[in-house]
Structures are given as C-alpha cells and as structure tokens.
Amino acid sequence: MTDKLTFLGLGVMGFPMAGHLAQAGYAVTVYNRTAQKAEKWLKTYGSARCALAATPAQAVCEADLVFACVGADKDVEDICVGEAGAFAAMKPGAVFVDHTTASAQVARAMYDKAKALGLGFLDAPVSGGEAGAQAGQLTVMCGGDQADFDQARPVMENYAKMMRLLGPAGSGQTAKMVNQICIAGTLQGLSEALHFCQSAGLDVEAVVDVISKGAAQSWQMENRAASMAAGSFDFGFAVDWMRKDLAIVLEEARRMGVSLPSTALIDQFYADVQA
Amino acid sequence: MTDKLTFLGLGVMGFPMAGHLAQAGYAVTVYNRTAQKAEKWLKTYGSARCALAATPAQAVCEADLVFACVGADKDVEDICVGEAGAFAAMKPGAVFVDHTTASAQVARAMYDKAKALGLGFLDAPVSGGEAGAQAGQLTVMCGGDQADFDQARPVMENYAKMMRLLGPAGSGQTAKMVNQICIAGTLQGLSEALHFCQSAGLDVEAVVDVISKGAAQSWQMENRAASMAAGSFDFGFAVDWMRKDLAIVLEEARRMGVSLPSTALIDQFYADVQA
Amino acid sequence: MTDKLTFLGLGVMGFPMAGHLAQAGYAVTVYNRTAQKAEKWLKTYGSARCALAATPAQAVCEADLVFACVGADKDVEDICVGEAGAFAAMKPGAVFVDHTTASAQVARAMYDKAKALGLGFLDAPVSGGEAGAQAGQLTVMCGGDQADFDQARPVMENYAKMMRLLGPAGSGQTAKMVNQICIAGTLQGLSEALHFCQSAGLDVEAVVDVISKGAAQSWQMENRAASMAAGSFDFGFAVDWMRKDLAIVLEEARRMGVSLPSTALIDQFYADVQA
Amino acid sequence: MTDKLTFLGLGVMGFPMAGHLAQAGYAVTVYNRTAQKAEKWLKTYGSARCALAATPAQAVCEADLVFACVGADKDVEDICVGEAGAFAAMKPGAVFVDHTTASAQVARAMYDKAKALGLGFLDAPVSGGEAGAQAGQLTVMCGGDQADFDQARPVMENYAKMMRLLGPAGSGQTAKMVNQICIAGTLQGLSEALHFCQSAGLDVEAVVDVISKGAAQSWQMENRAASMAAGSFDFGFAVDWMRKDLAIVLEEARRMGVSLPSTALIDQFYADVQA
Ligand SMILES: NC(=O)C1=CN([C@@H]2O[C@H](COP(=O)(O)OP(=O)(O)OC[C@H]3O[C@@H](n4cnc5c(N)ncnc54)[C@H](OP(=O)(O)O)[C@@H]3O)[C@@H](O)[C@H]2O)C=CC1
Ligand SMILES: NC(=O)C1=CN([C@@H]2O[C@H](COP(=O)(O)OP(=O)(O)OC[C@H]3O[C@@H](n4cnc5c(N)ncnc54)[C@H](OP(=O)(O)O)[C@@H]3O)[C@@H](O)[C@H]2O)C=CC1
Ligand SMILES: NC(=O)C1=CN([C@@H]2O[C@H](COP(=O)(O)OP(=O)(O)OC[C@H]3O[C@@H](n4cnc5c(N)ncnc54)[C@H](OP(=O)(O)O)[C@@H]3O)[C@@H](O)[C@H]2O)C=CC1
C-alpha cells in the first residue's frame, strides 16, 4: 500500500502540490535545492509524518512514489541521475512521477534509465497554473506504463481533477506541447483582438461579455481578457515559462519535421515582451 | 406595436432566422434575390400572414422592422439604397436591422442615410453559424441608437440568446471583427496543435479530452477538434467566409493603424486552403 | 513628331522627372494641384517653351504625350476622368503615361476608357526613388500596347535607364508589385539581421562589408544597411509609401487567390513602425 | 614557414577546398570519416607531398595549420576533442581553422580548449556554396585571435576571395548567422514574388530582367530566380542545410533575447518543403 511519498522541488507548483499530499495524511519527505523553501513548507503543511531531506537521494530512499516538479530538462536529469540523484537511491518497484514540463526526449531517456534499475517512471506534466495547484484542480497528462500510472493515480487525485495515461514514455510531455500550442494561438488571437477593440474605442468588457458566449469563447478569454485589457497581465512570469515551453515544442516539431508557422511566430513575439 | 416584419436575404443564415419570426406569429414578408429560395421558405415556414415580394422596396413598405442578412458591403448597399432598395420605401420610424457581416464604414454610411430619411438603422452581425441560426441561439452584436435597439430586441429574441448594443453605428461590426480575430487565432493554434498531435502518433481524441478541461479549452476545441482531426472540416464554405471577414478586419486595422501580425498571417494561410 | 508634353503631379518624383523633360528641350506644360509647386518648378526648370496650367484638362489639350505621377488609385481617376480631368481634353492619338504606383485594376479601367476615346494609355510605375528620379536613372515597368510604348519610350529615356513593356494594361503595375514583394522580404531580412548583429556586439560595418560580397548581397544591403544600422533610416516617409504599395499587392493577391504569408506579416510590422 | 597542412572532412565543400591547397603545392594530409572519399581526393588532387590518415589525430601531428569542414556542432566536437580527435595530437602553436557552419557556443568552447593546450583556433565558416569552393572564391568570416588569423590567411587565400577577422572567438559563426538571416528574407521575398508573378501570367524572365536593375536586386535574384521560376531549384539539398543554419540562428537569438519573427516563420516554411 502506498503510504510513504517524496516530493522534489517546492516551487510555485510543487509547494502546494506537496501540501495536498501532506494534508491527505501521507508521510511526505520533501527536498528543495534552496533549503529555506523546504523549511517553510514544513511549517505550512508538515505533519508529524513529514520530513526534510538534504538531497534527492536522501529524500527518496523509503518512498513508494516520488514526485518532482522542477524547472527544465537539465534539472530533471540532475535530480534523477545527477550527483545524489534519486534513481540510485530509490526502492525497487518505486515509481518516479515527473510533473516538470520538459522534453519528450528527456522523458524517454529517464524512463529507460528507471526501467533498467527496476523502477517506474511517468512523465506527467500538469496544466492549471498556480491557482490550479493551490486548489488541487490540476490536469495531469501522463506517458509511461499502465501499472505505474495505476499506482500513482490515487495519490495524484489529491491535487488533480483530471489525469490520463496517453501512451508510452514521452506521451505526457507531447500532450502538454499540444496544450501549449493551443494556448499560444488562443492567447495571440485574444491579444490582437483586445488591442484592436481598444483602438476602436469599444468597451472591452462589454464586447468580451458578448463574444464569450459564442464561437470565440475560450478559457483564456474568460480568465485572462479582463487583466489583459487592463494591461496588468503579469508578463514577466508567464512569458518566461511560455518561451521555455515553446522552445521545447519547436525543438520537437523540428525533430518531427512538422511545420508550426504561427506558433514559431508567436514565440518570437514573446522575445520582444521579455526584452 | 411591432407586428409586421420584413426579412431580406434567405441564405444559410437568413432562411432559419426568418423562419423563427414566422413561427413566432409575426406577419413576415420575405424577399430573396433568387426567387426559388423565397418560395421554398414560404412552403417551409409561411403562415397565412406571410408573403413574398419581388424587390426589397416592395417587401418593406408596411414593415415596422426590416431585417437583412446578405453577403458583403456591396450587397448591403444594393438592398438598402440600390435600385428598388429598401430605404426609399420604408415607413417613417421603421428600423432596418442589418445582420450581414460587413465593414464598419458601410454600417456608418447606411446609418447616416437611414437617419436622414427618418429611419432607424442597426448594424447587427451575428455569430453562432448555421447551427445557431437554426436553433435560434445566435449572438447579436449591435451598433446604433438605443431606441432602435429597444425596438428590435424583443423580435430578435426569437433567434438570439444574447444581444447587446455596444456603441454607436459601426460598433456591432467592430465587435464582430474582435470576435473573428479571436476565432482565427484559436483555430490556427488548434489546427497546428492537432497536426503536431497526429504527427507524434498520439490519440487525438484522448488528448483533446484531457486538455479541453483546462487552460487550452475553447469553443472551437470542443466543437471542431473532432472533425478537424478527421479531416472532414468543411473548408470550402468556412474558409471563404473567414477570408471575407478577415479582409474586413485587416482593412479596418489598416485604417486604424493597428498591427495584427498573426491575424494577417493566418489570413494568408487561408488563401492556400482556398486554392 | 513628339514635341509637346504635359506633366501632371510635381511631387517628390514628378518634379525632377518633368525637369529632365524640360532640360531635354521639350515644350512642357505642367499642372500641380497645389499651385506653388508648379510655380517653383517653372522657376527651377522652365524654359521659354514651358508653361503652367490650372487643371489637368487645360494642361493636356495640345500634348502628344501626357505624363502623370500622383498618389494612388483615386488620384489617378481624378486627374484622368474626374472634373476637368485629362482624358476628355486630350488630342486623338495622344498617349497618357501614368507613373503612379497604383492597382492593376485602375490601370485596366483607365486603359479601357482611354481606348474608347481614341487615346493611348500606359501604366508605367517606376522604381529608383527620389535619387533615381533626380539622376534620371529610373526603371520603368510598362503595361499596355506596343505602339503607345514605342511613342513614349524615347521621351522617358530622359529620366529612365531601363524601360520595358511587360504585357497588356496592368502589367506594369503588376511588375511593380513583384518588385515591392522582393524589396519587402529583403528589407525585413536585412533589418532582422542587423538587429541580431548589433545585439551580438559585432561591428556592423565590418560584417556587412564581408557578407555583401556573397550570396547575402542585395541593393538594399549596399544602399541601406549603413543608415539602417545608424538608426537614421527615414521610416516616416518610406514606410507610408511601402504600406500603400503592400496594400495594393495584398489586395491583388487576394483577388488572385495567391498566398503571400511573409509579405502580409511584414506589412503588419510596418503598422507598428507607423504608429 | 607554413608548409604542412591537414584537411579534415572532404565533403561537398572540403573536397575542392583541400584540392586548392594541394594544387598550391602544400604538403596536405587529409582525413575523411568515409575513407573512399579521401582516396578519391588523393587520386584527384594528390601530389607526392600529400597523404591520407586514418584518424584526425594521425592526420594533424605534423601540421602547422589544420583545416576542417564537417557537418555541425557535434561533428566539430568529435574531430577536435573526441576519440582520436585532433587537439590532443597537434603541435604546440599549430592553428585549427574550422570552416564548418556551427554555433558560436561550440566555437567559443573549442577556442578555450585549444588555447588551454597552447593551440590556436579560428571559427571560420564560409559562404559561396559548392560553386564558390570549386572556383576558390569563398568568403570566410573569422572569429578568434589576430595572430592565428594572420597565420591562416595566406593559406586560405587559395580558396577565398574575401577573408576577415570580425572579433573574438564565435564572431565568425555569428557573422555567418547574419548572412543567413539576410538570405532567408531575400529568398522568401523572391519566392513569394515569383509565385505572384507567375500567377498573374507575367513573363517571369522579363520582369526579373527589369527589376534586377533597381532596388529589388539581390545576388539571389540574379543567381536563383531563373531556376526558382523553372521549379528546378534543388530544394532537397539546400533546404536541409538552410534549416540546420536557421536552427543555429534561432537558438542563438533565443539566448540573446533577440526577436526574429520573419526568420522564424520562414524556417517553419522550410519544414513543409522538407516534408
Ligand atoms: N507556474 C506555472 O503556472 C506552471 C508551471 N509548470 C511547470 O512546472 C515546473 C515548475 O514550475 P514552477 O513551480 O512554477 O517553477 P519554480 O521556478 O517556482 O520552481 C522550480 C523548482 O524546481 C527547483 N529546481 C530547479 N532546478 C533544479 C535543479 N537543477 N536541482 C534541484 N532543484 C531544482 C527549484 O529549486 P530552488 O527553490 O532551489 O530554485 C524550485 O523548487 C516547470 O517545468 C514549469 O514549466 C506547469 C504548469 C504551470
Ligand atoms: N517617392 C518615392 O520614393 C517613390 C514614389 N513612387 C510612387 O510615385 C507616386 C508619387 O510619389 P511622390 O512623388 O513621392 O509623392 P508626393 O506626395 O511627393 O507627390 C504626389 C503628387 O501627386 C499630386 N496629387 C495627389 N493626389 C492628387 C489628386 N487627387 N489630384 C491632383 N493631384 C494629386 C500631389 O499634388 P499636391 O502637390 O497638390 O499634393 C503631388 O504633386 C506614388 O504613387 C508613389 O507610390 C514610386 C517610386 C518611388
Ligand atoms: N554545401 C554548401 O553549399 C555549404 C556548406 N556549408 C557548411 O559547410 C559544412 C560542410 O558542408 P558540406 O561539405 O556541404 O557537407 P557534406 O555533407 O558534403 O560533408 C560533410 C563532411 O563532414 C564529414 N563529417 C561529418 N560529421 C563527421 C564526424 N562526426 N566525424 C568526422 N567527419 C564528419 C563527412 O564525412 P563522411 O564523408 O564520412 O560523411 C564529410 O566529409 C557544413 O557545416 C555546411 O553547413 C557552408 C556553406 C555552403
């Protein structure tokens, strides 16, 4: 029975995700590169069954399931197979669930290394943002083996409203890329539309109210149009992650020989916003 | 009390819209350039209070409200102020409601001409497509005067679920442009995403099922992804209208000095689909 | 024998072009909407055989060849067939040579009207800019009939280094569009390249010096890179004409069903520069 | 005095480049991964002073200057510092001149490794294509130290008409990127222009003849327009290299935070051509 868990990476996403697991009563050992965040986490969520660890290796040795949510490819490699990485210390049969948004290539590479060590591995990137993580309403897109997914699912349920195994290793990351391509197009359309709307002197709120009832509706329109129109969209944050994600998408598309003209263009516009 | 109505243009949209008015019990006189469609309409929806007319002028002379849904700018001018056009024959105080998607310029020009003749004029483009027209679930974006809108609203309710006056003459058309810019971006993102998804060998239905629960969700994804993935999207029709609409959008943006890079690019991609 | 000429429109281009004709000894009657420019022209270039006229009609009545270089479509219609326009006053057999950059449609329409009146008409847009006009080194792209071209050619030689009849009416304008599409692509590449070069901290002049010897060479690179790098490119002016020209191009491409994705995108970038 | 040379990589470019060196009388030792090409080279160009070697290390041990022209980043690393790589076997003070088109990062990394071993290193990508290599008319863009450049220059003169040191390590590769950005824009403009020209029914050759005398002129137009119009452009080959080069460009732009919208778009169009 799954009872002992590890969570690696207590950033914007990992912090509340790990919190839901602690609140559900699991014994959660956490690791964060910058120790203060782990201490803060322990104060916020930690029960008597929770603990801190100084390295991934120390954090995982008793865990049935290990969750991670770090930055990008290199970071995933670091915590899995780097110095004092998790894999070498994990119990046989334990499953590593990687919630990081990373490349499908790194997912497949980690899957292979895990399997060779008798471990399970799921690439399991999430969508839903900080708000979704806090509310425990994330969507999780998984790639890997059914048995590993079945083992992780009941635990992930504590922070996810939707989980699905979409195919072999890498499929979760690829599905997340599909997600990001959709978002990029929708957001670009929305941003050009709002710019046009304001330039035409129309009442943005009224127009959005009307058009969000029909074929132009999107989650982004419902949740972002108001702040975008007010110019208070926190670009600094969102844009950096978006560019990271689109870099992964475009790299994968290049490998597959798939043309994504508008996605590539939008990615360049983000460079201007970043600058 | 509004009782006698006219409907000009019984195409894909106008045919069922006028039908809803007849079914609601109004006395509806219809005109269609190609007479057979008008005859078919009369057989389908016509009550004893309904009639055909041979020209816009003949159709409108007793009406309190005149509705139209024709092709584009030139067509609006034709039926309003062309030979045997409606304006010259309308009763003082009657209101012309134009459901055509056209330019804001033609809307403002027709509004001015109508007012000079003691008539009302609303630009009132719709969204919702053929299905929305048949189900009486359209969204109507209006520009013009409050009094004219108040007069038209209870009648439009027979085919619309959402109606709003968004500002002076032209505002309805401008709002529709905002709508189309959003749709263009969302559809392009969706189409690149599905292409990517299929090329990666993922199960499109499963991926769409998962991502449509989160930040990538859109009306287009929910209603079009399946048929787009199946390749059975009726491009022939949709693309022609979309190009017409985007031509209006880009012309207006040019006049306003607004830059719509991704919309302009997408419009060009449609040229390839048309070819 | 051609001896009496008219020049309509003494703007940046027409002023020096007409000057070359006067200096070649022709009897040149000029008309400019704003009379001061015509007076200034007469002071600068006018011989005893030159004269001013108050309308296009007055200017053309004795001319064998009428040249014009005005703004855009509407202006061409104005001076040709508007009130006191040239056509109604021209001698039978006289040829109207339009150096304006305009649409192929207006060229074909004016050609038809001219022919119906027993006149000749050439659409004859130029390239080479103000410097080319002053130096008499323009390139002239012509559409129309061979006989009309043969009559105009020896006179145009006074300000052109290259003239060619490219096909029936409209072909000159279409060739000019081909020219502008090339320039738009080259300039955009150049501007992204210089931006990249400067951001990388390289010496722009040295890099341009090297690469302009090979496959990246272009007239634009040789003539514009230095001022573009210095940021002293007179965008205000050039961009307005470029947008006018690209609007004509994109409108024509739309009519033909031709996709010009990168040209359409670049056109939108100019909107930002204009703003 | 420089007399003994090595050339690594006898592909489309390296084969004739090394040939010029042999023909100039130098003692040239060559290495090619696939041995047959080296044997063919020896038959074609080899003098009594020329020889084959089985590895980079064996090829370079007596050389004053080592030239290489291989595929991409990984290949440069292989032949420099991989197993039996050149660096470990080179004489102190010898200079490695890398003609491969690769990233500025790999250039800087190899420079650092070379310097640490008491060697010289120049990143020295070329432009001019196969024809330029055969004719000995290449352009060479160099990054590195002046002394190393001074040592290599007289030898490179045998296949280059233009060589320049543009700054520290990486500057040659960065300049080549500037070159490729220009070419991408120019080629895209040209290809849209020719497509438009043909669709309009104009005589492409005649139009190109006229416009290549003015502001639309480019090396690409003069050298490629005819074959592009004839559809006989060898896309298969050129497009693969172009995509490799643009991938390097876009990666570097991402690192620098520079936005290259039109270049990124064009790169995606190549994906379609490749497919
Ligand atoms: N934020 C969002 O809205 C969403 C984010 N994501 C994805 O989730 C992932 C995490 O995002 P988020 O939580 O916002 O990011 P944060 O930057 O807030 O957190 C990153 C976490 O990863 C740790 N980390 C990074 N690199 C390493 C490394 N090499 N070794 C050890 N630990 C490392 C950081 O440690 P330290 O504290 O020491 O820096 C930190 O705990 C990213 O892949 C992101 O793309 C997905 C959906 C939404
Ligand atoms: N400038 C350049 O570098 C190039 C320009 N061209 C093309 O040449 C044409 C002229 O350009 P340019 O000389 O720079 O423009 P200017 O604006 O300097 O001159 C325009 C001329 O046209 C006259 N004009 C405009 N509209 C009318 C009208 N309705 N009735 C009568 N006269 C009118 C103006 O009269 P008024 O003085 O009263 O305003 C003026 O003499 C344009 O089509 C442009 O695209 C082509 C190649 C290069
Ligand atoms: N072709 C062109 O028009 C131009 C090319 N360039 C650049 O020049 C470089 C070479 O191009 P080109 O000559 O056309 O390419 P080719 O593919 O014809 O030749 C590549 C050469 O590199 C060798 N090579 C590749 N990888 C390795 C490796 N890992 N170890 C050892 N040898 C290796 C190949 O060996 P083998 O024979 O065993 O495959 C071959 O000799 C590229 O960077 C290209 O971008 C620059 C300007 C123009």
Image (tube, coloured by chain):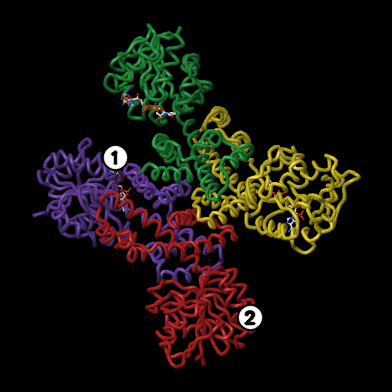
Chain colours: A purple, B red, C yellow, D green
Q: Give residue A142's position: percent from left, percent from top.
A: 22, 53
Badge 1 element: helix
Report the residue marked by disc 2.
Answer: B115
Q: Which chain is indicated by disc 1?
A: A
Q: Crowding at label 1, few (<14), some or many (≥20) Cα neighbours within 10 Å?
A: few
- Which chain contains the residue that carries disc 2? B
In the rendered structure, the answer to whether residue C122 lies left or right of residue A17 reads right
Vertical position of residue C213 compared to residue B216: above or below: above
Describe residue A26's horizontal placement relative to residue D94 as left or right.
left
Q: Relative to B197, is D206 above or below? A: above
Query: In the image, what residue occupies the spot 23% across and 41% down?
Result: A79
Q: Farthest residue in the right direction?
A: C48
Query: Could you tell whether C218 is left or right of A1 in the image?
Result: right
Residue placed under numbered mark 1 in the picture: A74
Query: Tag 1: residue type?
Result: Lys
Badge 2 and badge 1 both on one subunit? no
**Label 1 near ligand 1 (CB < 8 Å):** yes
Which secondary structure, mark 2? Answer: helix
Q: Is residue C106 visible?
A: yes
